[in-house]
Image: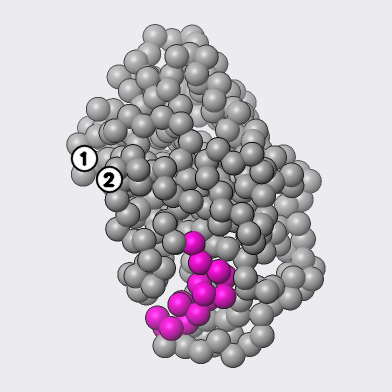
Amino acid sequence: MKVLITGATGLIGQEIVGLCHQSKIDVHYLTTSKNKLTSEKNYKGFYWNPSKGEIDSKCFEDVEVIINLVGATVAKRWTKRYKQEIIDSRVDTASLIIESLKKVKHSIRHIVSASAIGIYLDSFQNYYMEESSKEDTGFLGEVVKKWEAAVEEFKTLNIEVSLLRIGLVLSNKGGAFPKMAKPIEKGVGAAFGSGKQWQSWIHLEDLARMFIYVVEEELTGIYNAVAPNPVSNNKLTRVVADQMSKKIILPNVPKFMMKLILGDMHVLLFSSQRVCSDKILEAGFQFRYDNITQAIEELI
C-alpha cells in the first residue's frame, strides 16, 4: 500500500511515518520546503505551496489513502491575521488537493484526517460522544467545523472520509507536554484556574497507531482520538509532579492572569472537554496507554 501524508514532518506525522515503514506501507509526503524533499524507495517528498495553489500532482501516483495532518499550530498567539492562517492552513489545503484530484487519474479511495475535540462545548458535566450536537461557538469550534467540512468534500469524489478528533497529545518529543513538565521539574508548576477542567488526552504512540488502524481496517466516519480515561487538570499536574518526585506548592494560576499573557489563546488551558473513546474501542482498537499514570511514567 502507498499513502500520501500532509504534515509528515510534524510531531504526529513523524510517528506515523515510522509506523508506516514498519508495516511496509510506502509514503509520499507533501512539503512546502524544497530542502525537505527526499526520494527514497519508500519515502518520497513532493513540493506544494497551498497559498499559491501549487502542488506536484505526481504525489498522487499509486496512492490509495491520504493521511491529512496539515495545519498551523493553535499554540501561537491568536492575532486576527494568525487566526485566519489557522483556518486557511486547514481549509485551503484540503480544497487544493480536491481540485487537483479532479484533474488527474488517481487511485485514492480513502482520506483519514486529523480534527480536534475543540469542536465540543466547554463543559464540566457533559461527556462527549462523536454524535454530540453541543458544539463550541468560539474560535476553536469555528476552526474544527470549517476543517471537517472541507475534508467532507472528498466524498464528492467518491473518496471515503475518516476524521479523528484529537485531544491533548502527550509526547516528550514536542507539543504541550514538555512545556507543562518543565516548570514542574523546576519546582514552580501549578494547575490552571479551578483545576477541575477535563483534559482528554492521548499518548502520541497510541494516536499514531490509531491512524494506521483506521487506514488498515478501512474505518470511516468520525472517531474521538482520546484515551479512555480523561483526567482533571489538577490530576494531570499532580501525576506529572509525582513521577518527577516533585511537589506542587504554588496555588493554581488564575484565569485572568493567563488571559493577560496569552490573550484569546488562554482558552487552550482552561477549556474543559470530557470526551468518550468507546467508538474506536468498539471498532477493535486497543490502547497501550489508557491510564494517565502509566502514560506519564513512560514519558518521564
Return the mark for residue 105. none
Q: Is 239 located above or below residue 137 in the figure?
A: below
For the stretch drawn in magenta, the main secondary structure is helix
| Label 2 – label 1 distance at C-alpha | 6 Å
* Residue 12 percent coordinates (x, y): 42, 49
Residue 7 relative to residue 49: left or right: left
Name the quarter where the N terminus is drawn. Answer: top left
**Looking at the image, which residue is at 70% across and 59% down?**
267
Q: Nearer the viewer, residue 32 or 104?
A: 104
**Looking at the image, which residue is at 45% across and 14% down?**
158
Residue 189 lies in magenta, yes or no?
A: no
Residue 242 lies in magenta, yes or no?
A: yes
- Range covered by the magenta-colored residues: 230-244
Return the mark for residue 19. 2
* Residue 40 percent coordinates (x, y): 26, 35
* Residue 147 percent coordinates (x, y): 60, 34
Q: Nearer the viewer, residue 215 or 231?
A: 231
Evaluate if marks 2 and 1 touch, with contact meaning CB atoms under 8 Å apart: yes
- According to the picture, the residue beneath numbered tag 1 turns out to be 23
* Residue 155 percent coordinates (x, y): 50, 18
